[in-house]
Amino acid sequence: MAELFRNAGLGWTDYVRSGKLVVLLLASLLFLWFGRKHREQGDLLRYTAITTFCCILPVTAVLLMLYQTRFYDYEWIWSLVPLTGMTAYGITVFLTEYGTEAGREKGHRNIAVPFLLLAAILLSGDMGNTAEEWDRQRTENARAKDVLEQLGEEYSGGDICLWAPREILEYARETDGSLRLPYGRNMWDLSLNGYSYDTYEESTIRMYQWMEWVGETGRPDMKVQIPEEGDGSYEEGGRKQTERTIRLEDSVSHAIEMGVNCILISENAGLDAVKRMERILGVKAGLLEGYYFFKP
């Protein structure tokens, strides 16, 4: 139970950092409750207010997480809330009354408005990307474009199926829509998946994990904890785990099977990893803007 409360708290923090839509929803609810004499959509407004605070309060959030089962994360309980619709409705009503000439002619000067705006500003703190994160993203974007332009010259406009670290793949299709990738951004950003079961094969997931691992540690082999097969029951701390080693050769072989014909790994990779890559691919490594480049 303590783990569920911890997950609920961390889930809320992660959820609000991903965007300001929840803050706008709270501002809309406050405005519709206290800034309006006539409350249209009363049932919908009450339902939205109840489900919103149930998702925010730790105790009720944990109950909702238990109801939806452990298969889903905290973020999924927000599917109960008509977040987009109610936010849009609140903004529309606000603009109708205070942002139009008709509203000004009616003399609407509600004292609740500055407090609502102040609440929105305060609740917007520490949400979204910081200035440092935006700078990092711009730097990564510029570097990725330089690397991808050089790859285009290497292949002279030919077909490229690229396997590379996340910071390259994240901007690959933005730079060149003709590039083929073994996996997309929904590998690390699960919110982009259309359905909860819209996932990659385990071997492809391990391939992605290995690529990030070799860039961070420089070691060619990665040890992972994999749940044991069983009846799906949970013990304290989750299902029983077994340790498995993901070897460089396993990941590279799977990439080749998927049609990859261009591989980049971080220059942080150790000499052992580079030599083994050269041996299994039968080509020499090249250097390209801080990455080892392999052309199978």
Image: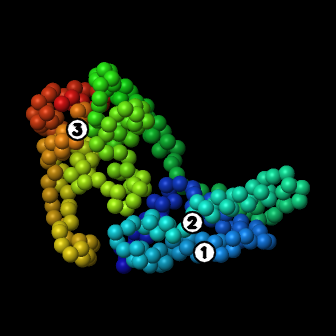
Tell me if I can see residue 226 in this picture: yes
In contact (CB < 8 Å): disc 3 and disc 2: no
Quadrant of the frame with the C terminus:
top left
State which mark lies toward you, 3 or 1. 3
Query: As displayed, is residue 290 above or below residue 238?
Result: above
Compared with residue 7, is residue 136 higher up or lower down, i.e. above or below? above
- The residue at the point 43 percent across, 36 percent down is 174
Q: Amino acid at mark 3?
A: Gly
Amino acid beneath label 1: Tyr
Disc 3 from disc 1: Cα separation: 50 Å
How many residues crowd around disc 3 within 10 Å: few (fewer than 14), some, or many (20 or more)?
Answer: some
Whether pointer 1 and pointer 2 mark residues with C-beta atoms closer than 8 Å, the reply is yes
Residue 72 vertical placement versus 194 (above, below): below
Q: Which mark is residue 259?
A: 3
The Cα atoms of the two marked residues, 3 and 2, are separated by 42 Å
Q: Residue 189 at what x, y percent from top left?
A: 39, 52
Query: Where, by quadrant of the figure, is residue 136 drawn?
Result: top left
As helix, strand or loop, the secondary structure at mark 2 comes to: loop
Asked which quadrant contains residue 251, the reply is: top left
Identify which residue, 269 or 280, lies in the foreground.
Answer: 280
Front residue of this view, candidates 295 and 291: 295
Q: Quadrant of the N terminus?
A: bottom left
Could you tell whether 28 is left or right of 189 in the image?
right
Checking the image for residue 82, the label placed there is: 2
Count neighbours of disc 1 (C-alpha within 10 A) and say few if under 14, some if 14 to 19, many if 20 or more: few
Give the residue pinned by disc 1: 47
Residue 218 lies, in percent from the top left, at 21, 42
Q: Label 1, label 2: how many angstroms apart (C-alpha)?
A: 9 Å
Earlier-in-chain disc, 3 versus 2: 2
The quarter holding residue 236 reads bottom left
Of the residues shown, which amino acid type is indicated by label 2?
A: Pro
